[in-house]
Image (cartoon, grey):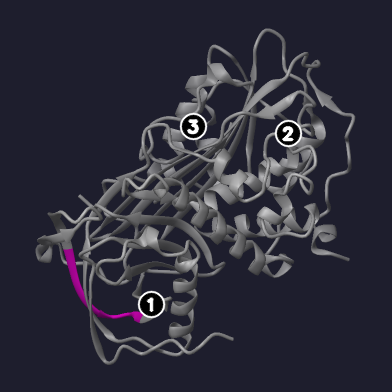
Amino acid sequence: MSAADHASRPASAAHGRVGPGASRRTMLLLSAVAASALAGCSHLSRGRAALGGTELTSDQTRAGLSLSQAPDLKAAVGACDALGAALLSAQLADGAHANALASPASLALNLAAVSLGATDPAAQGLDGLLGAKDEDARSTTWSAIQSALLVHDGDVADFDPADRAPEHPLLHVADQIVIIDRGRPAEIAQEFVDNVRHWFSADLRRVGADEAQDVLDTWVDQNTAGLIKSSALQADQLQVAMQNVVLFAAQWEKLFDEDATAEADFTRADGKVVRVQTMRQTSAMVCTEGSTGAVTWKVLRVPYSEDFALDIVLPQQGTLPEALPADTWAAASALLDEAQDEGIFPEVNLTLPRIDLSTPTGGVDVLPVLGSLGADIRPMGRINPEFETTAYRQQVRLIVREDGTVAAAVSEHGGAAAAPNPGPTTDFHVDHPYVLRLRDLSTGLALFEAVVNDPS
């Protein structure tokens, strides 16, 4: 019997509907919001009193799955890496050398839930996109991943991003699906509601058109602890909205000394030298180097207090991150994993810019990114035959400072060679464009990624 069977999948209710029928093609919008500080699904009730609408009910209970029951964990992590690489590449494609931010985990978790409403997930490329062979494997794997992440969940109502980052990491993952009624209630398949309730911790509600925008905005603001103030979706343009939030906050294993932070030169992607606030620390950390063709890069792992780490990839001076293949960053993290296993912990003299970065207003357009990966999220016939995704956005905010990292993201639907040892001591001066990967070491999942061309 498979892990999915053990999870007691909800019985099929393909003909069950919630509400009367829709008469026209309906716009579905999805949103992924990521902030370095994660919002936990077990505390969604925190915001319900302030949100309008009516909760959609189901007799299904959440499948309690462990990572050992995930049939495709390695493939899922690889798929998540590919999503992150594609999100970053899309933002850098115009050659403007702007910063690029992404939350692969937020998008993947949102897609896993959304796929339960897709007309034909296999034909639409969604199973492969998420590293699964079929729907059972996809749902089982990503449900187990969500459960593993929620081990670090906490009440976001008690978290203030301006305070010192928490000693014990906070990772909050939340999902909301909002049905927006215009005139008469929209028809929603009960099987979709049941499946979402069974596999994922999610808040499902029905709201009137007059309160929809406030519900979307308030939910994002509450579940990112104010790091992201409002939804990237426009409620007047949709009938269904699917939102996912990932919020992370944690102290470094060794805090940077604020008194040591000072201005230092940083050479931007356009060659201009700017002065930026730069943190300093000397500590034993996992550090190694690799190469892509003729280009070499150094990679460093800065640990948080527990279970998480920030991997920093620094290409050689004169090479911009976007000039390297998009899979370089995941390969760099894999090399760090190997270096850690081999005990390569040199004394590192680290200088790292202090940053507070966000995606542009309106977030990142996810639909063309999925198209570039051969996936089509538009047909949503298992929610309602008339539903189609017309917008998909991700918003990300990332703060790296002396006490730790605070980040948030919102996704919305509307046998390798040995790692080189750099020696007993090494310098790692981040003074030109670089890449950050904030990873959950228990799953291997990339929670946040950024290409930083200009930390100022």
3D distance between C-alphas at marks 2 and 1: 44 Å
Name the one closer to the observer, 52 or 290: 290
- Residue nearest the viewer, comparing 287 with 405: 287
- Amino acid of disc 1: Ala
- In the displayed structure image, the side of residue 146 where residue 340 appears, left or right: left
Compared with residue 326, is residue 26 higher up or lower down, i.e. above or below? Answer: above
> Given the image, on which type of amino acid does mark 2 rest?
Pro
The answer to whether residue 154 is seen in the rendering is no
Question: What residue appears at the point 45 percent right and 90 percent down from the top-left corner?
Answer: 342
Quarter of the image where one finds residue 221: top left
Stretch of the chain drawn in magenta: 279-287
Residue that mark 3 sits on: 219
* Residue located 66% across and 66% down the image: 75
Q: Where 428 sits versus 82, above or below?
A: below
Q: What residue is shown at x 53% (from left), y 16% (from top)?
A: 211
Mark 1, residue position: 294
Q: Which of marks 3 and 2 is nearer the N terminus?
A: 3
Q: Earlier in the sequence, mark 3 or mark 1?
A: 3
Q: Residue furthest front?
A: 294
- The residue to which callout 2 is attached is 379
Residue 190's tag is none
Q: Position of residue 436 (x, y in %)?
A: 37, 61
- Distance between the alpha carbons at the discs numbered 3 and 1: 47 Å
Residue nearest the viewer, comparing 199 with 359: 359
Q: Say what secondary structure mark 3 lies in.
A: helix
Q: Is residue 301 visible?
A: yes
